[in-house]
Image (cartoon, rainbow, N blue to C red):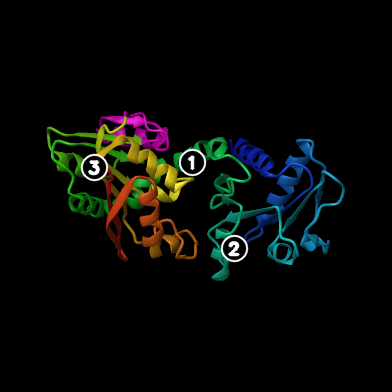
Amino acid sequence: MTQDRWDEVMTLLVESVPAGRATVVVDGTDATIGPAADRLAAALRAAGRPTTRSSTATGSPAAAGSAGAVGEVLVADGAEARAGAPDGWDVVVWLRTSRREHAADGARGDTADVVVDLHDPAWPVIRHVDPRLLDRRRWHLVESRAFFGVRAGTWDAKFGDDLPAYAAAVEAAGLPPGGVVVDAGCGTGRALPALRTAVGPSGTVIGLDHTPQMLAKAQEKGNTGLVLADASRLPFADGSIDAVFAAGLVMHLPDPVDGLRELARVTRPGGRLVLFHPTGRAALAARHGRVLRPDDPLAEAPLAATATLSGWRLTTYDDAADHFLALADRLP
């Protein structure tokens, strides 16, 4: 299964390399970058792409930044190669591991064209691909399921102590009693009990997630009304929902505007959107080894703009150290 996962990732990386002559650099903070670049070069050759493997470790001129023959692909690795190419690289692949050597590592990851999560070297998962390289419909759902599926069994043990924060967020949201509420990206169902309390016995709570293993854990707790579906393609009629609760969803959407627009489609005018995370943005960025940037999708100004473009009006924004909560109302 481990080899299959690597093969799946390499297939997608090969598809992400532009046709014709191209340059690719694999960057990261530890020794995994060399073997990963070797794998990619081998996968490109197996796909019929003439490929030169250049490594800074051997003293080769990896920083040249250009492939040789027409149609050839140059694959290099390392920060030195990435920084040394005068014209940049066609594709920058960042391997995200738990090791950070200095603050600039976060920025190097944030500006990569492709990000591969490699916290578990046996289970690589693609977490970002620049849309100019590969359509998100080709990679996002399968890779998201790969990412969350293997974590479902230990999710509650790792994050179970944040249930009070979920309850507080639901209470602050002011959800309508008797309403229909969707928990989009419900995971193991941590918010579902509080949501059912909020809408009362006459209300309806639907837990939706795209990962079967997560929903299985939610079902083990006795939750009903669970739906396996992609939050980017909701199986609900226009205007049929009173409120959407989304914990940690926005950062996992390949396109936040399109994603929030789909949530708006199914929500009635005046309905509510609740965006929540049990830690603030700064703590979340630190956990993921990212630099907190002003253009972050959950920063107040970008989020307000995204909300307006997708059919919402941001009414509450609270980015505290121990939680993130944003409320928006569906525009008429």
Please, what secondary structure does the residue beneath circle 2 have? helix
**Which residue sits at x=85%, y=45%?**
70
Q: Quadrant of residue 56?
A: bottom right
Residue at x-position 26% and y-position 44%:
191
Classify 330 as above or below 317.
above
**Residue lying at the far front of the rendered structure:** 332
Q: Position of residue 312 (x, y in %)?
A: 32, 48
Is residue 236 a member of the stretch shown in magenta? yes
- Residue 215 drawn above or below residue 121: above
Q: Nearer the viewer, residue 235 or 37?
A: 235
Q: Which residue is mark 3?
A: 271
Distance, label 3 to label 1, CA atoms, is: 28 Å
Above or below: residue 149 compared with residue 224: below
Q: Residues within 10 Å of mark 2 (few under 14, many from 20)?
A: some
In the picture, which quadrant includes the N terminus? top right
Residue 135's spot in the image, x, y percent?
Answer: 58, 39
- Say whether residue 258 is visible: yes
Find the magenta span and give its range.
209-237
Identify residue for label 2: 108
Residue that mark 1 sits on: 144
* Residue type, label 3: Gly
Residue type beneath disc 2: Arg
